Image (cartoon, rainbow, N blue to C red):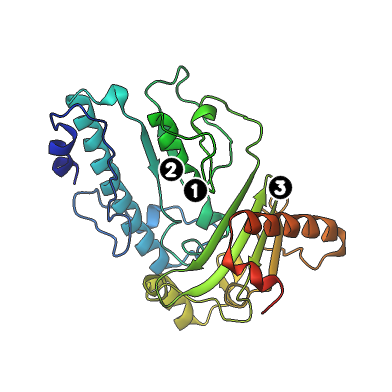
Amino acid sequence: MAEACKSFVTADDNQPFFLYFCTTEPHRPFVREGSDPINPADVIVPHYLPDIPECREELAKYYASVQRADSGLGRLIEILKETGRWNDTLIIYISDNGIAFPAAKTTLYEPGIRLPCVVRNPFAMKKNIVTDAMVTWADITPTILDFAGVLTENPSFHGRSFLSILEHEHPSGWDEIYTSHTFHEITMYYPMRLVRTRRYKLIWNIAHKLDYPFASDLYDSKTWQAILKRGDKLYGKRTIEAYIHRPKFELYDLKNDPHEINNLADDPKHANVLEELKQKLLEFQKRTKDPWILKWKYE
C-alpha cells in the first residue's frame, strides 16, 4: 500500500494532497505475513480480556498484525522523506476502534474509545509533547481544515480543531467528550450515547431492553467461543451477564473504578452527578440534532 502511494505523493502538480492510508491490519482475520512471530506465552493480556489459551493465541496474531501495519506506515514515512514532503505534511495516526475483541471494539467502555492518536505537525515549535486534551474523531476534519488554512469562523461541525493545543500538555477547555454508537453492521443495532469528564463517565444504553449484540467477527472469535464452550461466568473483570444485559444508565467513577465495574447510576450518593451528566448529554443531543433524543420520552 505504501509503495502504491508513491506515485500519488510525487505527482508533479505542486498542489497540496490529502492521503487516507487505511490498512486492513490489524482487523480480523489477523494477518501474520511480513511480521515477526510472537509467542502466545509472552503476550500481555489486558485486564478486560480473559487470560485463556485461545485469547493468548489470538492476541499473538493481533500484535503481529499490528507490527505489519506499523511497517507499512514506516515505509510511507520513508517515501515522504525521499520525496521532500516530510517537512510540510501533517500526519494524524489513529485507530478507528478498539482492539477487535469483545469488551473493546463496538463498546463505549474505555478499551473501546481510548484509542491511539499520534499527530505530527511539521511546523510545531515544540516536539515530543504528550497532551492530556480529550479529543474525539469528530475533531479530525476541522483540525485538517485548520492546518490547510480554510477553516471558516463558524463551521457547522460537531467537533473542533485541536491544532492549536498540540504543543500544550494540559490545555484548558479540553476536559469533556461525547461519543456515540448506533450499530456495527446490520446485525448490531444498539444505540448508545456517552458523556465523559475527567472523572466520570455516563453511558445511556438507549436499547437497554435488548441483549447486547455482537459484531460477527467478535462473536465468531476463538476467544468468545471458548468462553461460551467453558460456560465461564467472567470475561476479564466483568461478568458475562453484565456485558450482555445492560441497564439504561451506566455511571462510573473512573478515578476509583478505572475498569468500569461498579455502576453508580442507582447510588443515591451520586444522584447529583447522574443528573448533571444526563443534562449535559441531552444538551449535546440538541446541539447535534441527534434523532435518538426522542428516546428520552419514548421507549
Q: Is residue 204 above or below residue 38?
A: below
Q: Are marks 2 and 3 in contact (CB under 8 Å)?
A: no
Mark in front: 1 vs 3: 1
Q: Are marks 1 and 2 in contact (CB under 8 Å)?
A: yes
Q: Is residue 4 above or below residue 164?
A: below
Label 1 environment density (alpha carbons within 10 Å; few <14, some 14–19, many ≥20): some
Q: Mark 3 = which residue?
A: 199
Find the distance from the CA under tag 2 to the CA under tag 3: 27 Å
Task: Please identify the quarter of the rendering in which residue 224 is found.
Answer: bottom left
Q: Nearer the viewer, residue 221 or 15?
A: 15
Q: Position of residue 190 (x, y in %)?
A: 53, 73
The residue depicted at 60 percent of the width and 76 percent of the height is 207
Q: Say which element carries label 3.
A: loop
Q: Do we see residue 165 in this rendering?
A: yes
Amino acid type for the residue under numbered disc 2: Thr
Looking at the image, which residue sits at the far top? 125
Amino acid type for the residue under numbered disc 3: Arg
The residue depicted at 64 percent of the width and 67 percent of the height is 293
Task: Please identify the quarter of the rendering in which residue 76 is found.
Answer: top left
Q: Mark 1 = which residue?
A: 138
Q: Nearer the viewer, residue 149 or 66?
A: 149
Q: Position of residue 267 (x, y in %)?
A: 83, 65
Find the distance from the CA under tag 1 to the CA under tag 3: 22 Å
The total of numbered circles placed on residues is 3
Q: Position of residue 134 (x, y in %)?
A: 58, 41
